[in-house]
Amino acid sequence: MDVELAKRAAAEKALTYVQSGMVLGLGTGSTVEAGLENLARLIAEGLRITCVSSSARTTQRAQQLGITLAELDSVQIIDLSIDGADQVDPYYAMIKGRGGALLREKILASHARRRIFVVDRSKQVPVLGHIDLPVEVVSYGWSHTAARIAKCLGSEVRVRRDGDAIVATDNSNYLIDCPIGGLRDPEALDHALRSIPGVVGTGIFVDMIDILIVGDG
Ligand code: 5RP
């Protein structure tokens, strides 16, 4: 499989669901970005939509392509959202957030009437896990929050860094990357992690997929 072709195929297919008059939520990541050029072309050709971005990264790319964006707070509802994922299991639970935008992505998706997720085949797994699960925490007392997360998981965790500097999310929070084994009950772990003060979101997404598009390359 050519992963880049597969991402493009999935992203292009997702665009076939976009119709004039819609408010479209744009997720984050290379798979979503694979469709942005085409989206810009469709808009230039007359598609009338309002786009809302889930991250500074998507905002930057959309603006480079001349796609006008609206703030989430300036729209009533998102008609359709398109986002990527790091893993999807057979029950449509996902791990997201390697791109660091998990909290805004979850907020955006939760306000969408219909949610499309676009992945290449390598993201489909029988059981979630065996990758790092990102957890977003407020910066205040982050090391203590991280210690609680580690205790909850029974494993070492680490704050995401770029070189020596701690990476700040678009919300000025930090990301704790948590190595996890096979995740049989994603909802329970999400709940347990979110009950730790300081945790504002996890990369576990359940009950969010309306349409899953799996690209092949
Ligand atoms: C960002 C995300 C991305 O959707 C996820 O990491 C997939 O990215 P890509 O399409 O680049 O593989 O959750 O926070």
Image: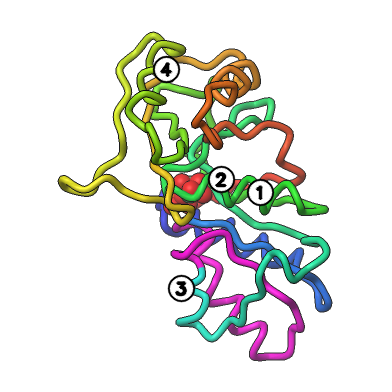
On the rendered structure, is 167 left or right of 58? left
In the rendered structure, which disc, 1 or 3, sits on the residue that comes first in sequence?
3
Which mark's residue is nearer the viewer, 2 or 4?
4
Residues shaded magenta: 29-58
**Camera-side mark, 4 or 3:** 4
Q: Is-magenta flag for residue 54?
A: yes
Q: Residues within 10 Å of mark 4 (few under 14, many from 20)?
A: some
Q: Mark 3 is on which residue type?
A: Arg
Numbered label attached to residue 148: 4
55 up-or-down from 144: above or below: below
* Residue wearing tag 3: 61
* Disc 2 packing (10 Å; few <14; some 14–19; many ≥20): many
For the residues carrying marks 2 and 3, which lies nearer the camera in this image?
2
Q: Earlier in the sequence, mark 2 or mark 4?
A: 2
Under mark 4, the amino acid is Arg
Find disc 2 in the rendering and name its residue. 103
- Quadrant location of residue 12? bottom right
Q: Residue furthest left?
A: 164
Query: In this figure, which residue is indicated by the disc labeled 1?
Result: 107
Q: On screen, 191 above or below 64?
A: above
What residue lies at 40% left-to-right and 22% top-to-bottom? 130
Q: Are marks 1 and 4 in contact (CB under 8 Å)?
A: no
Whole-percent x and y of residue 185? 61, 15
Q: Tell me whether the residue at label 2 lies in contact with that at label 3, contact meaning CB atoms closer than 8 angstroms.
A: no
Q: Is residue 22 left or right of residue 155?
A: right
* Residue in the foreground of this view, choosing between 159 and 197: 197
Distance between the Cα atoms at labels 2 and 4? 20 Å
Query: Mark 2 is on which residue type?
Result: Leu
Q: Are marks 2 and 4 in contact (CB under 8 Å)?
A: no
In the image, residue 71 lies in the stretch drawn in magenta: no
Which residue occupies 43% across, 52% down?
172
Whether ligand 1 has any atom under 8 Å from the Cβ at mark 3 is answered as: no
